[in-house]
Amino acid sequence: MSLYQQLGGEAAVNAAVDIFYRKVLQDERINRFFSGVDMEKQSAKQKAFLTMAFGGPNHYTGADMRRGHAHLVAQGLNDSHFDAVVEDLGATLKELGVSDALIAQVAAVAETTRNDVLGK
């Protein structure tokens, strides 16, 4: 069974992304990177990306991670910010009752994007 299915499929990903962005927008470490961002569009892109990344149906049409985040790297995006995002995602999943084992799998998937997100 895919990670996407284990997490609960579309409904679970949708709920997680909605809660996640509430956390991100309140997180003083990273919320400046979302200033002026259309959060409805951002949420839709994130839902599609996570669905694909977790092994669900692939409807992601956004830019690759390196190009999609290059403007943020130019604004100072670094490892500490990436860590904050992963932390907020883990806290979101914990809030939704996801097991520690599945949260660790999600964190491992997120980790595979670090170098591209940070332009390394």
Image (tube, grey):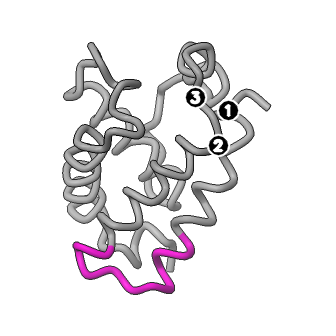
User: Relative to residue 24, is residue 74 drawn left or right?
Assistant: right
- Report if residue 51 lies within the magenta region: no
The mark found on residue 118 in the picture is: 1
Q: Nearer the viewer, mark 1 or mark 2?
A: 2
The mark found on residue 77 in the picture is: 3
What predominant SS class does the magenta segment belong to?
Answer: helix
The mark that comes first in sequence, 3 or 1, is: 3
Identity of the amino acid at label 3?
A: Leu
Q: Residue at x 48, y 45 (%)?
A: 58
The mark that comes first in sequence, 1 or 2, is: 2
The mark found on residue 79 in the picture is: 2
Identity of the amino acid at label 2?
A: Asp
Label 1 and label 2: CA atoms lie apart by 7 Å
Density class for disc 3 (Cα within 10 Å; few <14, some 14-19, many ≥20) is some
Region in magenta:
94-105
Contact, CB < 8 Å: mark 3 with mark 1? Answer: yes
Q: Give percent across and percent down for residue 101.
A: 50, 86
Label 3 and label 2: CA atoms lie apart by 7 Å
Against 17, residue 36 (above or below) is above
Label 3 and label 1: CA atoms lie apart by 7 Å
The quadrant in which residue 34 appears is top left
Q: Nearer the viewer, mark 3 or mark 1?
A: 3
